[in-house]
Image (tube, rainbow, N blue to C red):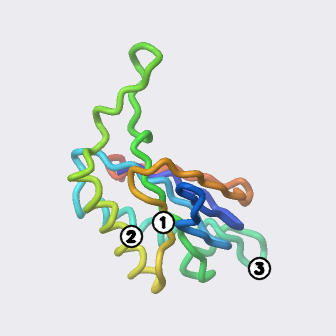
Amino acid sequence: MRAVIQRVSEASCQVNGAVTGLIKQGVVVLLGIEEADDRDDVAWLAQKIANLRVFGDENGLMNRSIQDIGGNVLLISQFTLFAQTKKGNRPSFIRAARPDKAIPLYEAMVAELSVRLGKPIATGVFGADMKVSLVNDGPVTIVMDTKDKDNH
């Protein structure tokens, strides 16, 4: 499981002109799921996202988590995070999980983050053509991969 986490002052997602998710201060999480992922990856990554200290304290230091500030999450599925670009110019997405595997794990991530933060999680629509708008605050952008836990 791979996540690109962006600290935002606001963000939204639209599908066919309708807003599916809207947040103020918090993080946008672009989530890629691969075939090798399971519920352990969901639990590990949700814990990391909920406790990631990327928000400023009274001294302007990044010492507060999304939980600490009562922030929000907009979770967007993004299979292209597993693009392979070694050969040619057209990316291959062979490592990305198929919907029958990815959808339950995506839904598990929504549920896990919601429990950890004690509030609903804003989302896009799995597999849809989404228009995501955000104001990256900082900018602060963190990349995490559950297969590379030693470096996080």
Label 2: element kind: helix
71 relative to 92 in the view: left or right: right
Amino acid at dot 2: Val
- How packed mark 1 is, by other alpha carbons closer than 10 Å (few <14, some 14-19, many 20 or more), is many
Q: How many residues crowd mark 2 within 10 Å: few (<14), some (14–19), many (20+)?
A: many
The nearer-to-camera label among 1 and 2 is 1
Question: Which numbered marker is on residue 148?
Answer: none
The quadrant holding residue 91 is top left
Separation of disc 2 and disc 3 at Cα? 30 Å
Quadrant into which the C terminus falls: bottom left
In-image side of 20 versus 48 (left or right): right
Give the structural element (helix, strand or loop) at label 3: loop
Which residue is disc 3 drawn over? 58
Q: Nearer the viewer, mark 1 or mark 3?
A: 1
Disc number for residue 110: 2
Q: Could you tell me which secondary element the residue under label 1 belongs to?
A: strand
Marks 1/2 in contact by CB < 8 Å: the verdict is yes
Identify the residue shown where x is 23% and y is 45%.
35
Q: Position of residue 63 (x, y in %)?
A: 63, 72
Pointer 1 or 2: first along the chain: 2
Q: Earlier in the sequence, mark 2 or mark 3?
A: 3
Q: Percent x, y for residue 19?
A: 58, 65
Q: Does residue 45 sit above or below 65 in this rendering?
A: above
Q: Any mark on residue 123, and which?
A: 1
Q: Bin the neighbour count of mark 3 within 10 Å (Cα to Cα): few under 14, some 14-19, many 20 and up.
A: few
